[in-house]
Structures are given as C-alpha cells and as structure tokens.
Image (spheres, coloured by chain):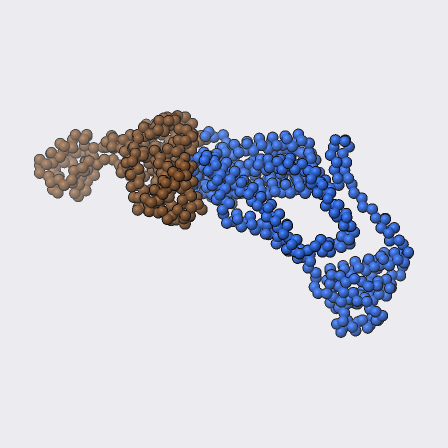
Chain colours: A brown, B blue
C-alpha cells in the first residue's frame, strides 16, 4: 500500500471539511477521488501532501507516518497552480526540484530528460511569462514529476488544457503508472474516472460516501437494464411481460428482476424468431451512481 | 542545501538581478550628485548682468565702494545730478545712487535714493544696502574718533558647555548634542526607510505568489513558515546590499564632488548666503569647530552603537516585515482593497518616526522617549536615536531584549496567519478574521 488514510478529520472554524475519511491506495493503482466542488477533496489532499495536518486520524505514506520529508515522495499538481512568471524555465525547474530534495546535478539530469522528451530543450532560458498557456502547463507537469515521486496527485489536471495537451499528459500519466508510480486523480468530472481509474472514493460534504474498485461498484449499482435493438417488431404482449423503461422506434430498454434473466429473455426472443441486432447491459455512469448515492445517504440520515 | 537557504538564495538573487534594483542602486547616488550640483549652481547664480551705478556721495561718507556680485560702483567725480542723469540717459550708467548727507550721528535710519528706469533685482538691492551700511558705520567710527579694536571687544560669543555634576560622568562639549542629533537622526531615518520599503516589498512578493497561484505548489514542497521566513531574510539581505552600495557610492560621490565643481574653500565662503556673518568667523575658529566635531564623533562608542544599530535593525525589520508578510498572505489580488489592512502596520512606524522628529529632537531623555525606546514596535526607530545621547545601559539592554523577543513572537505569529491566508482564495478578509487564524491548528 502506498497510501493509507485512517479516520482523518479536518475542521475549519465550525465547519468540518473532512469527516472521518479512510482510504487505502494500492501501489501502482490509479485512484480516483471524486466529488462535487467543495466536497472536501482538496482539504484531504492538502493533508496527504503535508500542507495541513489532520485534526484527528493518521496518514501513512509508503509505510511511514507522514513526516517532514514525506513531500519528497509526492508529486502534487494542485488545481490552483502556477509558476513564477518572471523566472526562466530552467532556473524554475531547478529550484522546484531542489526543494523536493534533489541535488543540483540530479535535478539538471532529470530536467534535461523531460525537456528532451517534450522536445523543448530550447526553452531553458525562456521566461515563463513569455510562454503560451499550454506550454506553461507542460512545464508545470514537469515540475510535478521531476523528482520521480512514488505517488502522483493530480487535482483537476485537465482543466484549461487543449485536447492535444490533454492527450499528451494522459499519455505521460499512463507511462508513469506503467513504470510503477501510483496516481491519485481528483476531479469533479466523473466521466474521466471511468477511463483512467481502477479504484475510487466518492466524497460528499466531507464524508466518504462510496469507496472501492471501479468495476465492482458499477456491478453493485447496476439496475439490470438491458437495451435490445431488433429488426423485426417485438412480440405482442412483450410490454405486459417486462418492465419497459424506455422505448423508441428501433430499441427498447427493459429492467430485469436480476441479471440471470438476461439469457432467458434472449432465448425467448430468439425462439420466436425476432431478429436481434444489439443486446447489451447498460451499466450506470458514475454520475448516476453519485446522484443515487447522495440521495441514499441524504435519505438515510 | 537546506530548503530555507534555497528559498533565501532565490529571493535574494531574483531581486538583485532585476534591472530596477540595479538602476535604483546606481541612480540614487547619482541623483544625489545631480542634486548637489544643482544646489551649487543655484547659489552661484547671480541675477542678471552687471549694472553700472553712478554714486553721488553728497555727504562725503562713502569713498570707493568695492564692486560686488554684478554691481559696479562708479564715483560721480564732481558731476552734478543733472549731468549724471544725461549720462544715464545716454547709457553710460544703468542707475544713479544718491546718498544724502547723514546730518546727525544719532540717526539710526538713513535713506538713499536709486534712480533708474530699469528694475533693480532684489539681490543687487541688498548688496547696495549692505555696502552703504558698512560704509556709514565706518564713517561714524571715524568721525566719533572711536577705536575699532575697542569696539570689537564689545562683542562676546557665549557658548554653553554642559558638564556632569559627578566626576564619573562623561564630559560633554557644546557639540555633543548636535552631533548626537545628527547621528541619531540619520539612524532613525535609515531605519524608518528600510522597514517601510523592504517590509512592503515582502508584502508585495507574498501577494504575487498568491496571485500567481504558485503558492500551493510551493506548499507541497516546503513548510509555509520556511517560505515566509526565506522571503523575509532574502528581501532583508537585498535591503542591506542596497544600503551598503549606497554608502559606498555616496562616499565616492562626496569625494568626487569638490573635484567636479572645481572649488576651493575660499570660494565656498564667498558663496555663502550671508557674507556678513561668514566674514565674522575667523578661519582658526572654523578649523576648531571641525576638530571638535571630529573629537565628539570619536568620543562616541562606535562598536556599541553599530552593533546595537544592527540588532535593532534586524529586530525592527523582522517585526514589521513579518507583519507585512502576514497581511500580504491575507490579501487578495487587489492591492487597493488591502490598504485597510496595511494601515495598522504603517501607523506605528510613522508614529515612531514622529516621536523622534517632534519629541526626541527637543528632549531625547523625556518620559515619552524612554517609553518609546522600550516599546518594541517603536524601539527599533527610537532607541538608535537615543543611543547617541548615552542613555543608561540597562535601558539599552532591556530594549534589546524586548525587541528581540518581540521579533521572535511576531515572526511566529505571522507564520500562523500566513499558513492560513496564503491558501485562501476569493475571499475578502477582515482583521477580525485574521486574528482568528492565529488559533487554528496546523
């Protein structure tokens, strides 16, 4: 386990930003931290990155309780990010890398590696303010990972990025992950999670409302909805037999009592000669799961 | 290298390499040079061209008047007023000066007449008045058969020399107070200037980090306290660099100035605004004054004054710079909006300076001054001023302890405010709210 957050609480004045949250992040996984704006994601991340300390609970990073040098193992790209505008690219990266504990020689080597990789070696002496927004984001990304962190925390990494840079950064994140870096991905845009993460935690009002493996959660929250698309019309009486949730000219969505019914339904339709072009299970999106989960927890209280 | 020293290094180097810093450091002494040259040029400047004045001496009191500062006196030489008038109309003279006979020696006022169609410049007018006053005085002395030497004996220059009652007390000369005022005043001013200028520099730099949004990136590498302290130390080092550069450059300018102006001391005396009194100081006395001031300067306990000044400077700088840093962290992007927060910091600095300027100069040992030289928000400016007047050593010691304790306290306090303020965005903050932050947990 790279990160273990145990029963952590953070209060500001009278308001509790993080309320008894526990999460474990497996080594080498891509972990999604989801929740609407203001849910407490950033407060939680700030405790993991030692910017603030928890009022209650403990956090372990790489098997050790967080301490002064823990930040050197973490690469953090905050949502509110920026660079020293008047500083040159090379100097700036050297400075930030040294603050993460690298020696000047190590830092130089790493920076050269990344500048070469992004084909921007000639930027060393350019001032940050002279670079375009997209270019600055690349520098920001290099600054985040230059010290080869074991845990990479990205808070809304793709906001403000154009599609080309988004793909470039996504690609780098994937490569880093394949090389063994664990990644925490914080976002309020649920659809990003499904394509990148294997585990998630869903936070609302500072509380952990859903936590686990992406596929398992989807299975747990599925409603046994199946979409059937046919070339010939469905038999009469079908509507009376099944719970139809949605219907249009070519397809119909039915809700089955459990997922073992799907084979039976398919057999039934095949036996009476309906020509089926599509038969699929509709899994819930994280948006839907989130809304349901929030409604459940609100109703339960 | 430790993180703090990395931060200090960056804060220092980025500022020192800035064009504005280099220009400011070089131009200030140059500005001083230009200022002196302008002043010098202005004092040398005489109003207009030389005028020729015919002197009609009806009383026979004035023989030849020496030409001076653009006025040439030409005796009438037996010509009548009418003849002179015609000559003036032809352009031989610019004006006619008619000096009526004095009449009675008791007369303390005398009127002379100047005839001209041209306006007489005020400077020339006073030259003429002064010359004739001198001549009439000489004439009176001569006519009354008085001995000029005996008259001179009537003038006595009284000087008050303060002495200590007890034997152990250090002797003070009449120059002690003046030299003390000068040293103290300069130290107080440097202190005021540095604290204001570099304190605000720290504040702007904190605000800039916040608006650039780099601060959260930094916070994930260093402790907020280190970032704040590094900034304060870095900017303070820049301030010291600038002051040292100014002292060196001003010294060079002061040495160069006489050469550039090409003046000898005699000419300096000539150009003094009031030649009457200047003439009264005899050269020996001048030399004596210089020596006495030098003696007074060497009598000061310089190692003590300098080291105390440095400690007070560090104390004062850390107190105010950390407060400016705390306020900077609480401010949003809008500098104007934050002015209300800056005011509570600038008020004590200005107040301390006013106490020195309006109370200290009249009485450096008054009760208010003693209090102000102890109170840590004032003492960095007030105590160095008092130092030049040898205050009791225990007062200096106590004040030092207090200012250092206060410096540590304010840096700690500012750190607590800073760590909360710096991560807060898009919120207008009040002083009341800031005071709450001090009690937040880490």
The C terminus of chain A - image quarter: top left
Measured as percent of width and height from the top left, residue B6 is found at 46, 38
Would residue A126 be seen by someone viewing this image from the given angle? yes
> Going by the image, does B115 lie left or right of A16?
right
Q: Is residue B58 above or below residue A64?
A: below
| Residue drawn at point x = 79 percent, y = 51 percent | B280
Q: Total label count? A: 0
For the N terminus of chain A, give its image quadrant. top left
Q: Residue furthest right?
A: B145
Q: Is residue A61 above or below residue A92?
A: above
**B363, B157: nearer the viewer:** B157
Nearest the viewer among A4 and A112 is A112
In the image, B421 versus B262, the foreground residue is B262
What x and y, as percent, mark residue B133?
82, 58
- Residue A287, located in which quarter of the rendered image? top left
Where residue A111 appears, x then y in whole percent? 37, 42
Residue A34 seen in this snapshot: no
> In the picture provided, is A147 more to the left or to the right than B157?
left
Identify which residue is drawn at 35% across, 36% down. Answer: A148
- Residue positioned 85% across, 48% down in the render: B153
Residue A299 location (% of width, % of height): 32, 29
């Amino acid at each position: 386990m790279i990160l273990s957050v145990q029963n952590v609480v953070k209060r500001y004045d009278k308001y509790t930003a993080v309320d008894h949250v526990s999460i474990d992040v497996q080594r080498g996984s891509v972990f999604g931290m989801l929740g609407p704006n203001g849910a407490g994601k950033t407060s939680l991340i700030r405790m993991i990155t030692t910017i603030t300390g928890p009022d209650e609970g403990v956090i372990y990073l790489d098997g050790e309780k967080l301490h002064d040098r823990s930040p050197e193992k973490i690469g953090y790209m905050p949502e509110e990010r920026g660079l020293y505008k008047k500083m040159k690219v090379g100097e700036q990266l050297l400075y930030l890398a040294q603050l993460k504990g690298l020696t000047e020689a190590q830092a130089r080597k790493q920076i050269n590696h990344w500048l070469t990789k992004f084909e921007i070696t000639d930027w060393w002496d350019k001032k940050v303010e002279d670079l375009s927004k997209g270019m600055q984001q690349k520098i920001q990304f290099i600054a985040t990972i230059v010290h080869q962190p074991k845990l990479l925390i990205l808070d809304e990494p793709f906001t403000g990025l154009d599609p080309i840079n988004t793909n470039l950064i996504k690609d780098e994140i994937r490569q880093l992950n394949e090389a063994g870096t664990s990644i925490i991905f914080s976002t309020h845009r649920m659809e990003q999670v499904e394509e990148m993460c294997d585990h998630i935690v869903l936070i609302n009002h500072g509380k952990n409302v859903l936590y686990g493996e992406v596929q398992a959660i989807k299975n747990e929250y599925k409603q046994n909805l199946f979409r059937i698309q046919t070339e010939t019309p469905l038999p009469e009486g079908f509507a009376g037999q099944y719970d139809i949730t949605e219907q249009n000219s070519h397809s119909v969505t039915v809700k089955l009592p459990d997922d073992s019914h799907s084979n039976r339904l398919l057999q039934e339709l095949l036996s009476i000669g309906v020509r089926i072009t599509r038969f699929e299970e509709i899994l819930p999106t994280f948006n839907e799961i989130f809304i349901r989960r929030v409604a459940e927890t609100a109703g339960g209280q | 290298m430790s993180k703090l020293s990395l931060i200090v290094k960056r804060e220092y180097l980025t500022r020192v390499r800035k064009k504005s810093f280099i220009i400011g450091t070089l131009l200030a002494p140059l500005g001083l040079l230009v200022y002196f040259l302008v002043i010098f040029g202005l004092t040398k400047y005489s109003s207009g061209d030389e005028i020729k004045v015919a002197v009609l001496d009806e009383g026979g009191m004035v023989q030849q008047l020496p030409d001076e500062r653009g006025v040439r006196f030409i005796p009438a030489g037996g010509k009548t007023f009418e003849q002179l008038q015609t000559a003036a109309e032809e352009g031989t003279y610019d004006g006619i000066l008619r000096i009526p006979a004095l009449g009675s020696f008791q007369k303390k006022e005398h009127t002379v007449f100047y005839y001209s169609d041209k306006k007489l410049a005020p400077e020339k007018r006073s030259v003429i008045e002064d010359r004739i006053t001198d001549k009439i005085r000489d004439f009176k002395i001569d006519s009354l058969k008085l001995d000029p030497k005996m008259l001179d004996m009537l003038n006595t220059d009284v000087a008050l020399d303060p002495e200590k009652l007890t034997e152990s007390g250090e002797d003070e000369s009449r120059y002690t107070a003046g030299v003390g005022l000068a040293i103290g005043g300069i130290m107080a001013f440097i202190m005021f200037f540095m604290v204001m200028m570099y304190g605000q520099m720290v504040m702007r730099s904190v605000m800039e980090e916040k608006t650039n949004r780099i601060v959260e990136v930094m916070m994930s590498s260093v402790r907020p306290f280190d970032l704040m302290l590094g900034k304060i130390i870095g900017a303070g080092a820049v301030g010291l660099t600038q002051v040292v550069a100014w002292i060196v450059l001003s010294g060079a300018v002061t040495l160069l100035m006489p050469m550039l102006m090409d003046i000898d001391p005699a000419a300096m005396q000539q150009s003094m605004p009031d030649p009457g009194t200047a003439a009264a100081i005899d050269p020996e006395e001048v030399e004596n004054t210089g020596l006495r001031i030098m003696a007074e300067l060497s009598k000061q306990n310089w190692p003590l004054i300098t080291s105390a000044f440095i400690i007070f400077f560090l104390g004062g700088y850390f107190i105010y710079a950390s407060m400016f840093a705390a306020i900077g962290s609480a401010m949003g992007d809008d500098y104007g909006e934050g002015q209300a927060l800056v005011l509570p910091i600038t008020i004590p600095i200005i107040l301390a300076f006013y106490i020195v300027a309006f109370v200290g100069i009249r009485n450096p040992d008054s009760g208010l001054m003693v209090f102000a030289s102890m109170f840590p928000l004032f003492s960095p400016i007030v105590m160095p001023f008092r130092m030049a007047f040898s205050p009791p050593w225990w007062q200096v010691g106590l004040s030092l302890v207090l200012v250092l304790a206060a410096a540590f306290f304010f840096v700690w306090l500012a750190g607590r405010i800073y760590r909360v303020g710096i991560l807060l965005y898009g919120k207008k903050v009040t002083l009341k709210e800031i005071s709450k932050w001090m009690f937040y947990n880490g």
